[in-house]
Amino acid sequence: MVDTNSCTVNLLIRKHEVGTKGAFRLARAIAAVAFSVATSLAIGILEGSNLAAVAMELQPAISRSGEGLVRSINEALRSATYWDGADGAMTVELSPTKTLWLFGDTLIAGGPKQGHPHRKMINNSVAIQDSSCDSAEGNTQSFDNVCIDSTCWSFWHRGKLHHPESVFAAEPADSYYWPGCGTVYDGKLYLLMKKIRKKDNPDPLFQFDWYADDLLIVSNPQDPPNKWVYTAYPLATLNHEVEYGLACTKDKDYFYSLCFLSDLPKKEKKAILARISWKDLLAKNTNNWQYWSDSEKQPQGLWEASYRNAKNIIPDCGPEASLFFHRGLNCFVAVYQPPLSPEVKLRVARKIEGPWSETFEIYKVPARLLKDGKSALSYAGKAHESLSSGNTIGFSYCENPGGLEQHVDNPGIYFPTVRSYTIEPQTVREMLDGAGSAKPKP
C-alpha cells in the first residue's frame, strides 16, 4: 500500500507549479486517495483558498469514494497536468506490463486564458500504463506523465501543446476517428475505428454521424505513440448496415468484433458477432468477414459470409462494450451500458457465439447533478481484460456534462471512472446454466 501522506505531499509539491488549476486537481486527487484522509486534507486546503469551484468538485468525488473504486487508475487519470479529461476508455494489452488506453474526444489544457484553463478538444488521444516503469518522470517524450503506486502513465497527442492534434487522423479532412476496440497479433496492433463527421443536432451530445469504419494496423505499437506508423483499411458494407467495433477479442485463428446491424426497414439495430481470419488479415484481405447467423439446417447457428441473417446475440447492447474470455470465471463475458441507461450490465456464455445469458446488473451509475440543475449523461460502460481476474471484473464508465460551456461550468466530470465488481461463482454458474433457456411464463 502507498503511504497516503507522502503521496499527498508529493502531489502538493507538483501541483503548486501550475497554480489554480493545480490546486483544483490536487483536491480531486486527495479525494481519490482515501475517504477519511481526503476529507480532512481537502478542508484544510479549501480554508486557505477562495476556490469555490474546488468545493463544488470535491463533493461528488467524495460521494463516489469507497468500495469498488480502482483508486490508482482514477487518481492517475485525474492527476495529469494538461490531459484534462476524455471519454471512451478502451484498453489493449501491449505486453505483460504495458496497457494501451484509447480515448475519444479529449480536452487538452494549453494554459490560462482570462483566469480559466484554455482548453482545446481533439477527437482521440491515448495513454500508456506501464507497471515496469520505476521513474516518476515516466516517458519524457510524451506531453504528460504521472506516476502512481510505481505505475507510470504517459499521455499522448500529436502536434504541439498549444495546437494539439489527434493521435489518429481520418480522411477526408472533415471526418475524424473515435476509437472502437483493438488487439495485438503477431507484433502489430489492430484497431477498429469509428469514422465520424459532424451532424446538425440541437443537443450538443449528439452532433455526430457515425458513417463508416476503418481497420487501422499499427506496425510498431511498442514504440512511443507519436512514432506509430499505421495503415487504414476501410470496412465497407453497402449502406454501412454493419457498424464494426463495439467490442473485439481474438483467438489463435480469428479476430472477432461485436457489431451493430441496422435491421431495415424497422430502423432497429441488432448486436451481432463478426469474425475474420488472421490468415486473411495478414494477406490484407480486410473485408472477408463472416457473421454468426440463424439457420434452418443448423438451429444453433452457423457462420455465413452474408450479414442478412445475423443473430442478435446481445439485444440491449450499447455502442461501446467489451467482450473477452474471462480466465477466472472460465467463460466469455460481455459488459456494456445500454443506450441512455445508467446500468452497467453483464452477460456470460460458454462459447463466444452463445447462447448468451440473461443480463445481470453489476453497477448503477449514480445521478450527477450539474450546476444548471440538469443531470450528466453516463455511458460507455465496459470491462477491461487486464483488470479482470479471479472472480473480479474491472470496468469503467464515462460521464458527460454536455457542450463546452457545460464542461467549463462543471470541471472534473468528464473523466472515465474505473471500478471493480466481485461476482459469486455460483451466480455465474446459474447464469450459464440458464443461457439460451426460454423465460418462464408469468
Image (cartoon, helix red, strand yellow):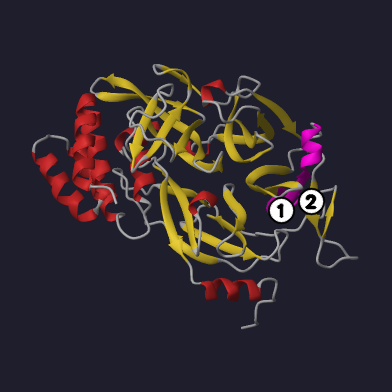
Q: Quadrant of the C terminus?
A: bottom right
Give the residues in magenta. 261-283
Tell me if I can see residue 50 in this picture: yes
User: Which amino acid is tagged 1?
Assistant: Ile
Q: Residue furthest bottom?
A: 442
Relative vertical location of residue 220 with respect to residue 11 in this rendering, above or below: above
> Left or right: where does residue 271 sit relative to residue 379?
right
Determine the residue positioned at 71% across, 50% down.
Answer: 251
Q: Which residue is mark 2?
A: 291
Q: Where's residue 84, x and y in %?
A: 37, 32
Q: Is disc 2 in contact with disc 1, using a CB cutoff of under 8 Å?
A: yes
Quarter of image, res 292: bottom right
> Left or right: where does residue 174 sit relative to residue 204?
right
Determine the residue positioned at 8% across, 37% down.
Answer: 48
Residue 272: mark in rendering: 1
Is residue 270 covered in magenta? Answer: yes
- Give the structural element (helix, strand or loop) at label 2: strand
Determine the residue positioned at 46% across, 49% down.
Answer: 397
